[in-house]
Image (cartoon, rainbow, N blue to C red):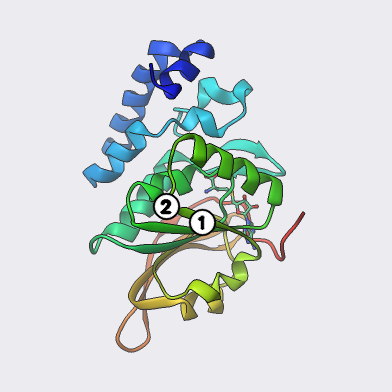
Amino acid sequence: MSREQDDMLRRGIGMTSQRTRERLIQRLYEEGVSNPKVLEVIRRTPRHLFVDEALAHRAYEDTALPIGHNQTISQPYMVARMSELLLEAGPLDKVMEIGTGSGYQTAVLSQLVERVFSVERIKVLQDRAKERLVELNLRNVVFRWGDGWEGWPALAPYNGIIVTAVATDVPQALLDQLAPGGRLVIPVGAGEVQQLMLIIREEQGFSRRVLGAVRFVPLLNGPLA
Ligand code: SAH
């Protein structure tokens, strides 16, 4: 028995979980997620391991859930949609993620691209996320405890950047760290008024696509112990 199956049984989720997982995939598909690789990765990634045990029974609902520290694990639809947008023009080798949180989006990305560089400002969340990825044997991820407004300049440029918290403006450092042709998927705005944006580094300048209203926790300032 795999560790994952063992874990599911131990928590009494068992077969129900497999059915609810299939239902989630069906729902994402109906809502317009069409990249089969993304759907497959979401199907096989055990989201219940990324939330508190008390919330595990809700892990396959298409909803954000609290992970402590006023933060949330992103809604599966958002994780799928943002991953699909990143991959729309073909495979990516170097992707930076801002806002590791539970590590769920990190885990999904790590199965879709060569390498993930994930930045988080809350140390305890990052440590827990690291442990989960090791448990799942997802080893192509490196973590940085720091401020996402600054990105991770030492390892730039990136072919893709994904931000999982809403920024009041697009951080200049992230634009600077995009490779030519690189893609940045980021929610921009404040409070109730937030738009998901796709920004691409063109030969000259940047193109921008607005993809619709979203709801994220804010991109805050500075690292936190
Ligand atoms: N993708 C994560 C979402 C977590 S919520 C998941 O599915 O679990 C957003 C995360 O962004 C939080 O963990 C929050 O601490 C982090 N964050 C907010 N501002 C940040 C900043 N300036 N730099 C790095 N991380 C930040």
Q: Quadrant of residue 212?
A: bottom left
Which numbered tag is attached to residue 142? 1
Is the residue marked by circle 1 packed among few (<14), some (14-19), or many (20+) residues within 10 Å? Answer: few
Name the amino acid type tagged 1: Val
Q: Nearer the viewer, residue 135 or 105?
A: 135
Instruction: Kindly identify the residue that appears in the image at 33 percent across and 24 percent down.
Output: 23
Apparent side of residue 60 relative to residue 169 in the rendered image (left or right) = left
User: Which of these two is toward me, 176 or 9?
Assistant: 9
Name the residue at 57% across, 72% down. 169
Residue 134 at what x, y percent from top left? 50, 40
Q: Amino acid at mark 2?
A: Asn
Which residue does the image show at 31% across and 62% down from the upper left?
A: 92
Measuring from the top left, give residue 200's x and y in whole percent: 35, 74
Asked whether, in this view, residue 178 is left or right of residue 99, the answer is left
Q: For this rendering, which residue is in front, 179 or 208?
A: 179
Residue tagged 2: 140
Badge 2 crowding class, 10 Å Cα cut-off, few under 14, some 14 to 19, many 20 or more, is some
Specify the quadrant that holds the N terminus. top left
Question: On the picture, is 99 further left or further right than 117?
Answer: right
Q: Is residue 136 above or below residue 79?
A: above
